[in-house]
Every structure is written in C-alpha cells, then in structure tokens.
Image (cartoon, helix red, strand yellow):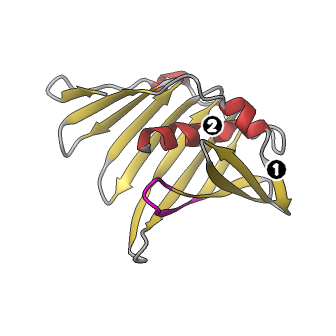
Amino acid sequence: MRFFLLFFFSTLTLFAHFITLHSFAADFTQTITDEQNKKLIYTGSLQAKEPQSALWLYKTPVKKSIYIKENRVIVIEPELEQAIVKHIPTHFDFFHMIQNAKKIKKDTYITTLEEKTYTITLSHGLVKALDYKDDFGNSINILFSHQLQNKEINDTLFKPIIPSEYDILQN
C-alpha cells in the first residue's frame, strides 16, 4: 500500500478540474500519527510531472529516493544499499478519480480511491496539504511548502541510477 500511496502522490499534477497543473515541485513534511497518538515525521522534497512521473527525496529521518514513472516505483535506500522495484497495477484510473474530486468548502476537496478518502487542501491556488488514513489506521498528513507549479522539469530527473553494488529486490 505504501507504493500505491506514493504513486497517488505523483498524481497531484492531475487536479486539473480545480487548478491547472502540468508539474509540481515542493518541500514536504509527512506526519504519520498512530492510534496511540505517536508521531513519525519525515521531511524531503517532491518533483512531479504529468502524466505520472514523480521523485520523492526523503531527507529525514532516513535518506531515500522514490522514483515513480507510470506503473513502476523504484525505492533507492542508500543506508541499506538496496533498491526495491515495484510494479503498480494499471487498473487504477487516477485521472477519473482526480477529475471527480469534490469541493467540500473553500480550498478543500475530497476524493476517494479504493475505499479511502483523501482530503486535499489548497492555499492561494497551490496544493498545501493532503490528508488520509492508511490501512493500519494511521492518520497521514503531508504538508507542502515552497510549492512551484507548472515549471519545466526535465524528464531525466525521473530516471533512477542504481549503484551496481546495491541489492535489487523485485516485488
């Protein structure tokens, strides 16, 4: 499910019916809060480009790079010297899902995918936050800052380079 979520985030560029995006770049803080109210906080940056390409660079608490291109996710974990390659089923219709996001109040939209509800918050026309509950009952909040919309992003950014000494795990 983690890879599915990452793939979903790469589709932020598809919220075209309420804002026009062709690319999106931002810093992020991802807070995962469990049922005992314990929090785990990740920080990093994201670059995404339509139709479905994204690069999540996690900086803290561990460094890792997550490349998303169409129906494939590659997670490169330098501390473990490994790369995980995951294929995402292509039966998800992300375009349809995003186009059906519904405004629930000013700058707040909801959309549902696989029986999960995602809340998207805008600020001054920019994607500011994404909230949802994962399969384990954790509350996930991703807060974006320093957002850039519709800036040119070179496609080569989305091509991972896996060091030859890394183990490659296929899922």
For numbered disc 2, what is the local secondary structure? helix
Q: Label for residue 59?
A: none
Magenta-drawn segment: 134-143
Q: Position of residue 130 (x, y in %)?
A: 62, 56
Does residue 3 lie above or below 58 as drawn? above
- Residue farthest toward the left in the current orientation of the protein: 165
Q: Residue at x 33, y 44 (%)?
A: 64
Q: Position of residue 151 (x, y in %)?
A: 68, 36
Which amino acid type corresponds to the residue marked 2 in the rendered image?
Answer: Thr
For numbered disc 1, what is the local secondary structure? strand
**Residue, disc 1:** 102
Q: Residues within 10 Å of mark 1 (few under 14, many from 20)?
A: some
N-terminal of the two: label 2 or label 1? 2
Which mark's residue is nearer the viewer, 2 or 1?
A: 1
Which amino acid type corresponds to the residue marked 1 in the rendered image?
Answer: Lys
Q: Residue at x 84, y 39 (%)?
A: 17
Q: Label for residue 11?
A: 2
Visible residue check, residue 125: yes
Q: Position of 111 compared to 77: left or right?
A: right
Q: Quadrant of the N terminus?
A: top left
